[in-house]
Structures are given as C-alpha cells and as structure tokens.
Amino acid sequence: MTSYIIVGAGVFGTSTAYHLKKQLPGSSVVLIDRSQPPCPVAASHDINKIVRADYESLFYCSLALKTLHRWKTDTFFKQWFRSSGLLTITDKNSQVIEKIIDNFRRLEVDYRPEILKPQDIGAKFNGTFADMSLRPDDKILFNGLAGIAEAEKALGATIKACMELGVQYVADPVSKLLIANGVCSGVQTRSGRTFTAAKIVLCTGANTAKLMADSAPDQPELQVGGRITARAVCTAAVELDSKRVKEFGEIPAVVHHSGTDQVGEYVVQMLRGTLDKEMLERWSWDRPLNHPKPDPYRPDTEWREFETTAAPKL
C-alpha cells in the first residue's frame, strides 16, 4: 500500500488528495494544513473564483478547457459553478486577446469570439458597464464559455468528500520537512507530531520558500531562491441588497489587463444571494513579518512570513 502526505489543503492539495484516494482507494493519504478546513489564508479561500480558459499560454488554455468541462458536467462540482461569461479588456498595444483567440483555434474549440468596442459596451449587460473607465482604443473580448465557482464552498465540500473517502485530515501547521541523505521521509508539525510516508507532496504555495528554509537551512540546493515568486492580491467585498443582486446577477466577470500586466479581476455577481454577517467579519488583512533565515541565493534579502490580523468591521 502506497502512503502519501500532502502538505497544504488549498485547491491543489485538496484536489490531489481527492483524486489520489478515488484512483487508489487502498492507499494511505494524509492531508495537512494549518487550520480546520477550509484554511482562511489559502489562496483558494474566497467567495468565488473565475473559471476560464482565456490564457495566453497554450498549455494553460488546454488544461483550463478540461477544467471547465469538469465544472460544467461533474455531478459533484457543477453545483458550485455558474456560467457567467468573461470580458477580457486590454489596451491597444496588447496581444493578449489575439493569443487567446489563436489558442482556441489551435485547440479546435467550438467557439466564436465576440469582439466589442468600448463605445458599444454600455448598451450590453443591462448597461452595467456604461460608466466603466475605458479608453477609446481599448480591446474587449467576450467569451461566453467562462464562468465562476463558489470557491470557499467548493473547497470545503471537496475536503469533506476527501475525508468521507478515507483521507486523514490533520489541522496542525507543518514546521519542517524530515530530510536526511537527500530523501524526504515525512514532516514535523508545530505541535511536535511526526508523520511519515513513502511520498511527500508539497502544495504550500507562497509558504514553500519559508518551509524549505526552515527544513534545510544548510542545503542551498534545496532552497527555492527565485524559482517561485509569491504574489499578493487585494480583495474588496461589497454587500448587495436584493435589488442589486438581481441587477448584477447575469453580468460577466472581468479580467482587465494593462500592457503586459493583469491589473484586476472583477466578479461582481453572487451565486447565492448576499454576503452574510459572519462572512463579512471573517475578512482579514495581511501583516508582513521578517523571516530570520536569509535567502542563500540572495543574502541581502529576508524571507517574509504573513500573519493574519483582524480586519476592521465593514
């Protein structure tokens, strides 16, 4: 019987545990994260996420098309998905939209792109975008294949399904990996518990660099260095009354690019009504803390750890 430890119960870790246990029901799978599920500081913990195949990378586009199909057809996952469509907005010099359209063509997707002009967008989608700040020469692509998923609910439900399949969930932060002679045999948690397995899978996102620095400080070849770059995302949530929920209920999500950067994603519709009081009070801010171990590839820098603090009441 093969044994696995998966560190990190975000979308990657949870999905790995779920499919491993379904395909190898006799295997031992332990899923470890820092808190009870779903972890509120995971990147995948959010009210909703855009599910799209509109990527410049052909590889990403191909994977995302399979994902979209799964969200729309799988009995378990489709309850958390809604087809909303997607607006991709770029400036006149960007080639993002052209690359997206070319990827769909190369992958032979049954898809007819709808190119919109800034002056015309105000008349569509119930006039919601009539006052949107756009330049006259901006490019706009509407793709009706995309949608949004209720991220937090889908993640929580999938973790629950994992446990029903026999996955062991452990709520205890992993403090370090157990590495000897170039082999990782397990993990040690903050409480001092040790877990071992034949295969250790890290799905630790932005925390990967810190975990490796803590686990093997004298082995620079194991450090992340510049191979992984963490990105921060600022999120704003607005509670809508029932009239506004109905007004915004059918409009598409938006991904807004500027030059080579993606400057914003807007998901203004809610799938199941307004935000409740508990959700509003659970939003948090990140405060950076310096990690004491420097990057061996860049001795002038320090690792940064993020601690969640209470947000002001909305």
Image (cartoon, rainbow, N blue to C red):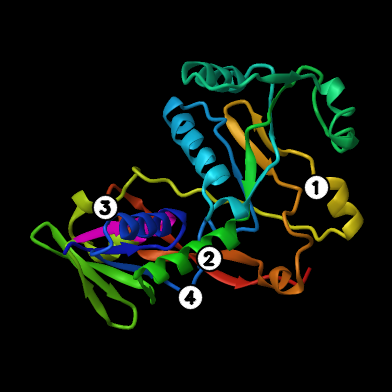
Which of disc 2 and disc 1 is earlier in sequence?
A: 2
Q: Is residue 109 above or below residue 301?
A: above
Asked if the magenta segment contains residue 204, the reply would be yes
| Image quadrant in which you'd find residue 126 | top right
Label 1 and label 4: CA atoms lie apart by 32 Å
Label 3 and label 1: CA atoms lie apart by 46 Å
Element carrying mark 1:
loop
Disc 4 designates what residue? 36
Amino acid type, callout 4 = Gln
Q: Residue at x 69, y 35 (%)?
A: 85
Q: Could you say where residue 193 lies in the image, as x and y percent from the top left?
A: 27, 81
Disc 3 designates what residue? 223
Q: Nearer the viewer, mark 4 or mark 2?
A: 2
Task: Check whether the beta carbons of the residues at disc 4 and disc 3 lie within 8 A of each other.
Answer: no
Q: Could you say where residue 144 lies in the image, as x and y percent from the top left?
A: 68, 31
Residue 156's tag is 2
Task: Check whether the beta carbons of the residues at disc 1 and disc 2 lie within 8 A of each other.
Answer: no
Disc 1 designates what residue? 249
Which of disc 1 and disc 3 is earlier in sequence?
A: 3
Asked if the magenta segment contains residue 77, the reply would be no
Image quadrant occupied by the C terminus: bottom right
Image quadrant occupied by the N terminus: bottom left
Residue range of the region highlighted in magenta in the rendering: 199-210
Left or right? Give the position of 212 relative to 115. Answer: left
Label 1 and label 2: CA atoms lie apart by 24 Å
| Image quadrant in which you'd find residue 125 | top right
Element carrying mark 3:
loop
- Whether residue 178 is visible to the viewer of this picture, yes or no, is no
